[in-house]
Amino acid sequence: MKHLLLSLSLIGAASLVACGKTEAPAAPAAEPTAAAAPAEAPAASQWPELRVAIDATYKPFTYKTDAGEPAGFDVDVAKALCEELKSKCVFVEQAWDGMIPGLQAKKYDVIISSMSITEERKQAVDFTGKYYNTPSCVVVKSDLNLGAEAANFKGKKLGVLKASTQEKYAMGELQPAGATIVAYDAQDQVYLDVKSGRLDGTVADVVEVNGGFLSTPDGAGYACAGARIPVEFDAKYFGAGAGVALRKEDTALRDALDAGIKAIRDNGKWQAIAEKHVPGVDLWGS
């Protein structure tokens, strides 16, 4: 019996050994896969930093928040254009009458601060196409019920922003008609003197004067005479709307900014910015 069990055990061991030797061959190793191509890095901007001049006394277009940060329609348009150019916006504050000299002296790269495109300014700097276009008006006491004609302002003392298109109009049309014109370094200084009674009124952009004066308690009792300055003076004094001003040699930057203006108009960013700052108003104009 012991011999039989031993024989069976030997047979079983042999069978197990045989089974071990007839194991299926391993599958061939997989071919190494090619490494994925690295993602293409975004193209570097030709203008990594864009220095943008603003006059922060021109609400709702350019002003400073209580925290001292630049804000307004122009500021947000500048930021949107910097995004299109893949640039970092750096804002530089500049008094209005020094804007073009500062640009020529290369203190900054562009002016995005409600600068109207006029033939006189185009002698010194270049411009993109417009990014908005609004009219101007003469603001006086509303109970005077005056129309917009220049003769209505005889004897009135009116404040204007120095080196502005409104100053050009006031000196060219209102002063010869008998008005006294006083130029100021900043538009908010004009409003302080209107409030104090040192001025009878001002000549200003319709949207700016509404945001900076007429809609405030200080502007109670004042209004635009005749809604706006007659349209026949637009071409002579006020130009073709506000554009981005830059040095004449910077043609590639001008073309990129023009493309940026078109892009933010097409993708809805411009309209969202306009509605944020001046809801319900046609800022694009004609």
Image (tube, rainbow, N blue to C red):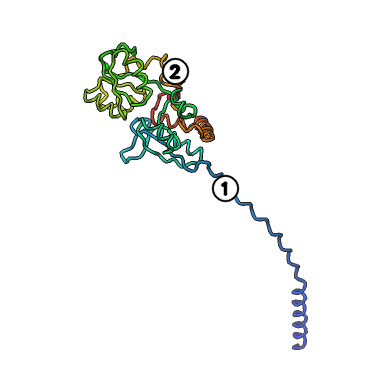
In the rendered image, the vertical position of residue 265 relative to residue 224, given as above or below = below
Coordinates of residue 118 in the picture (x, y in percent)? 44, 23
Q: Quadrant of residue 19?
A: bottom right
* Left or right of 74 in this view: 221: left
Looking at the rendered structure, the kind of residue marked 2 is Ala
Along the viewing direction, whichever of 139 and 28 lies nearer the viewer? 139
Q: In this view, does 53 lie above or below 32?
A: above
SS at badge 2: helix
Q: In which quarter of the image is residue 92?
A: top left
Tell me which label, 2 or 1, sits earlier in the chain: 1
Q: What secondary structure is found at the residue carrying circle 1?
A: loop
Looking at the figure, which quarter contains the N terminus? Answer: bottom right
| Image location (x, y in percent) of residue 68 | 32, 40
Which percent across, then down, holds residue 113?
Answer: 40, 31
Q: Residue at x 28, y 29 (%)?
A: 189
- Answer few, some or many: residues within 10 Å of disc 2's Cα (few below 14, many 20 plus, some between 14 and 19): few
Q: Which mark is residue 41?
A: 1
Q: Which of 126 and 207 is in front in this view?
A: 126
Q: Do the residues labelled 2 and 1 touch (CB within 8 Å)?
A: no
Residue 264 image position (x, y, % from top left): 50, 32
Relative to 16, say whether 58 is above or below.
Answer: above
Front residue of this view, candidates 31 and 218: 218
Residue for badge 2: 235
